[in-house]
Every structure is written in C-alpha cells, then in structure tokens.
Amino acid sequence: MPSSPQEPQQETQQETVEVDLGGRTVRVPKDGLYDRYRMETDLDEVARDPRVSGVDFFRKLPKTKVDSPIGPTLTPNFYYRVSTARLTMLAPTRAIRSRLPRELAPLEVAPGLGLVSTMFFRYDVCDIDFYTEAAVGIAVKPARHGRLGFFDLVAALKNDHLDSYVLSLPVSTEIAQVRGHDGYGFPKWVTGLDVDIDAHRTSARVANDAGGTDLALSAPTPAQTIHPSGKRVSSLTSYTSIGDAWHSTLSQTNVLASGTALVPRDVGLEVGEGRMADDLRSLKPIRTIQFDVVTEGQLALHMPVPTSVRSR
C-alpha cells in the first residue's frame, strides 16, 4: 500500500463559510467535506480521493445521531487518512499524580514509574476537513474496572489499547477546537501547528502565543510495516470531565502502515516555552522508551459517554 503524498498545510488560504456549532460560529473550508455533508459524508466520494486507500473500515461503522453540547451531531467522526507520531516516556509516579485528578491512577511499569507521552497528528481527509493536532498525555489505569495492571501495561506498550488523561491538546482549526473543547471536554486551543510524516522523516512544530516554539519533534521515521485494512485496529479511551460528570471517549484506529523504535537515540524533541512545554516539564520525564509512527491509518472518534470512576 504505497504512501500517498501529503498536501501542503495551507488551509488558512482557502475560502471559508460560517457554520453554527451549539451556538458557536466557526469558519470551515467552503465546499469541504463538512460544508457539504455536515458529518454525513458520502463514502463513495471519499473512496475516489487518491489520498484514501479505501473506505471498507467505515462501511462497517454506521453513524448514529446524538444530542451533544455542540448540538445534534452524528457519531463517530470519521478520519479517512491520518498519520501519527508518539513518544512514550518514563516519568516519576509522584510527578504524574500531581497532574492527575484524584479519581484517576497512573499506569505504572514499576513501583514509582509511570508512562507519559507526546503525540502529533495529521488528519489529511476528515469529516471536519484537514487539521493537525498535538498532545501531552498520561497513561492511566482503566477507570471502571480493576484489571491487573500488568496486562494493561502489555496492551498499552503493544498499542492495542490505551487509557489516557490528556493535559494539553492544541489544534490548527476552529471547528476542531470547538468540537473538541465544548463537545468532548478536551483542553484544546488553536495555534500554529505543522505536522509532516512520511516513510523517511517525521517532523512537527507547535507554536506558542508569541509565535515561538512550544514543542517540536524531528526524527527518522521507523521502518514501516504494511497491514491489511481491519487486521490491526487499536483503541484509545480518554477520560474527561464535562460539567461535573466524568465521560469516556473511544477512538478506534485502523492501522495501515506503522513502525516502532525502542529506546530511540536519534529523536530530537525541543521543549520550548508554552502550555505544552509546561505540561511536559511538570511530569519530569526521565527517558524515551518508545517511538511509534503510523504513516497511514484511519480513525473513528466516538462522542463521549458518561462513565463511572472509582473514588480514591
């Protein structure tokens, strides 16, 4: 499955139209997927996009109309062509606990050591149009049941399933910010954010409020393995508080091409000045143990649902 070229990140130069999201007005690309379909995207049209390998994964995931803080919407949100990069780091449990709500507990790899990550995302073809995203997150134990931590750890490191709490999640477009913040409860804001991932190189830069560097990544892309569609589907459960209630958000990734470097030595991570940099420093990361890159994947992001968490 050859990797298609990515389009230049020039979405700000496109003509836009205004749309309403739960009383908030945002601008989206004129004649883009959201402008034309309002989340009810024609899969046959998407299948004709040369950047998209296929849409069979989505045909098996029917959408449902739900009420939400951003008004009636369809779920899941479909991402037809994505690429991602994640650095997984060891950090002291004490520092991690200082940033977690008391209802959540860190997933430990050893007594006193947990896992934190920095992540970068590029969504080339999506129901809400092109955007980029970055995150600083903490791996946590599942909130609703008491599975043994060892098995959760194995699943997490294999990228089969992760449970997380996100500290910062900047994005590059208004609609992604409003949907993510108001609809999902994530700590999202809009900033300059470039992400470029191909089979040879992975690079990303998040700008701070002054236009300088908040967080930046540059590294060779780990050798990629091709996966048939539907054969490797990983999941991520993220916990957020909306109002006074806990919610969980499920995302499912259909991995099409991916690679991993263990204890990588040639990864450059610049921690500058800004909200992401402050969040990462507060976790006191010790060393990077894994670098995962998906050069091609697809994603289904479900709307959050109320969930119970254990009192601690």
Image: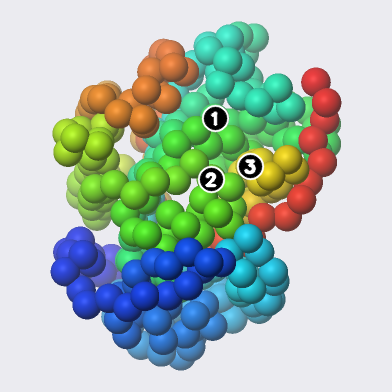
Under tag 1, what secondary structure?
strand
Nearest the camera: 66 or 53?
A: 66
Give the percent coordinates (x, y) of residue 5.
21, 67
With 245 as the anchor, is 168 left or right in this view?
left
What number of labels is visible?
3
Q: Is residue 302 left or right of residue 309?
A: left
Q: Dot 3 lies on which element?
A: strand
The disc, 2 or 1, on the residue closer to the chain's N-terminal end is 1
Q: Quadrant of the C terminus?
A: top right
Query: What residue is shown with label 1?
Result: 138
Mark 2 and mark 3 in contact? Answer it, CB < 8 Å: yes
Q: Secondary structure at mark 2?
A: loop
- The amino acid at mark 3 is Thr
Residue drawn at 42 percent across, 25 percent down:
279
Question: Which of pointers 3 and 1 lies earlier in the amino acid sequence?
Answer: 1
Quadrant of the rendering where the N terminus is positioned: bottom left
| Residue topped by disc 2 | 186
Q: Amino acid at mark 2?
A: Phe
